[in-house]
Image (cartoon, helix red, strand yellow):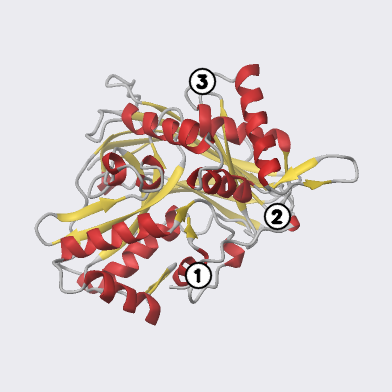
Amino acid sequence: MKMPTGPQFEDRYRTIDEGRILEAIMLLGWAFSEPSDTIRLAARQALDRWIQQGLSVRITQGGQCLFDPVEVVFHLKNAGRLGHDDFWSRHYVTTSRRLVQELPTHPPGRITVSMKRRFSLRAVTPGRTLRLRMPLPLAERCHDLDIQPFTTHDGGTCIVTDGRMERHIRAGDTDHAWLGARISFVPTEAASDDSVTDPALYLKSGEGLIRITNRISSLSRRLAGNQSPRLAVLAFWNFILDTFLSGPVHYDQIPADTPLDWVLDNGCCDCHLASSFLVALCRARGIPARLVSGNFLYPHSPTMHYWAEVRMDDSGWRPFDFMSWDLSCGGQENDWRQYFFGRVDARIISQCLPRSCTGPVGISIPPDWRVIQTAEEGGVKIDLVAGDGCSLHTDHITVETTENAKKETPVYSMAK
C-alpha cells in the first residue's frame, strides 16, 4: 500500500476564532472540570505548542488569529501519535476513558435528555416554507420512550415521528428558528433482528459512504482469507485501528463515488468513515452490516457519533465502535483495543441505516461544513458551521442519568 498523503489543510478552512478553539480544546481535555483560568492557560499553552510544531494559523489584517478545527484536532492527535506532544495521551485519552467509565456498558436505568436545535435562517429567502428537523431516539432501540416537545412562540407546526422531530414554518424576518424536546427513556442493549426478512438490505455495495470498490473488495479478501466471520471481522477491526488516524475530516475533499478509497489514500477517517469502512469490508465478505448513529449519553460530553453493527450468526447484531482508537492511544494499549468490539454503552440511537433515517435537516448545508463542540450550561453545544465560520445550526444537549429521573406526563409518547 502506498504511503498516505494525509488530509489537505488550506487557509480557506481557517475561519474559527481563537476563543472558540480554546473552548473546544477545554472540552476535549478537561470535560470533568469547571472552566478556570488555570485550565484556560493550559489550553492556551497547548495551542501555542502546536503552532510552534507547525499548526497553521491565519492572521487577519486586524491581527485576529483564525484556526481550522479539523486541522487542530488532526494535529494534536498526530503529534501525540508521533510522540511530539503529550496533550493527546495526558488529557484527551484520559478524558475519553473517564467518560466511558462514568457510564457503564449495561443499561443505566431511566435517562432524561434535553435537546434543542437552533437553525440559522440568514441565507433563507423570506416567505420560503421550511421543514426543519432534529433527530430523536428510535422507539425500537429503547424502552418506555417519552418525548415532550418544548413550546415555541414563533408559529409553525411541530410534528413528532419515530426518530425525528419536525417544524414546518414559513421564513420571516427573524434570523433563526429552533425546536427541541425533553426526552426520557430506558436504554436497551438488544438490537432489532430483521436480517432474516430482508438480508440483502445489509449487503448492498453502494449506500452513502459505504462504497465497495475493487480496492475495498481486494482488501476484504486479503484480510479475511478463509477465516470464520468473527475472525474476519476481527481482522477488519485490527486493520482499521492500526492503519488510520481517527479524527475529523473535510468532507468537501472526499469523492462521492470512492470515499473509502480516499481513506486508504489519506490515512485518516472520522467515526462515520471508519464505521462505513468496516461495514464495506464486511459486506464485501458477505457478512451483513449496517451504520448506526445517535448521541453519547455521557453527561459531561453527550456528543453526536456513528458506529457499526455487524450480524454474527451466533449472536445476532453486534455493535463495533472505533472510539476504541482513542481509548487505546491509537491501538497501542491492548487493554483498551477491544473496549467497544461487539458491545457499546447506553446511547441515543436515532438512525439505523438504511431503514431508519432522520433525513435532511431542512436548511442548505454547504460542502465545506465543519463541526465545533464546546461545553455549555451543564452539557454541550455542537455547532455546525459553514465555510465562513458562521453557524448553520447549533445543538444544545444535556443529560441526566439518575434511576429516579422525574417522569412527567408526555405530550407525545411511544412505548415499546
Secondary structure under tag 3 reads loop
**Is 296 drawn above or below residue 201 in the view shown?**
above
Residue corresponding to mark 1: 265
Q: Which badge, 3 or 1, is on the more N-terminal residue?
A: 3
**Is 260 drawn above or below residue 401 in the view shown?**
below
Farthest left residue in view:
314
Q: Amino acid at mark 3?
A: Ser
Q: Which badge, 2 or 1, is on the more N-terminal residue?
A: 2
Q: Quadrant of residue 206?
A: bottom left
Q: Quadrant of the C terminus?
A: top left
Is residue 177 among what the camera can see? yes
Distance of label 2 from label 3 (alpha carbons): 30 Å
Distance of label 3 from label 1 (alpha carbons): 38 Å
Left or right for 52, reference 222: right
Farthest front residue in view:
83
Q: Residue at x 37, y 75 (%)?
A: 216
**Is 355 drawn above or below residue 90 in the view shown?**
below
Q: Which mark is residue 13?
A: 2
Q: Amino acid at mark 2?
A: Tyr
Q: Position of residue 53 (x, y in %)?
A: 66, 44
Left or right for 195, reference 156: left
**Is 391 drawn above or below residue 152 in the view shown?**
below
Q: Which badge, 2 or 3, is on the more N-terminal residue?
A: 2
Q: Quadrant of residue 311?
A: bottom left
Asked if the residue at tag 1 contacts the one at tag 3, i.e. Cβ–Cβ closer than 8 Å, the answer is no
Farthest bottom residue in view:
214
Q: Nearer the viewer, mark 3 or mark 1?
A: 1
Q: Residue at x 74, y 48 (%)?
A: 15
Q: Which mark is residue 33?
A: 3
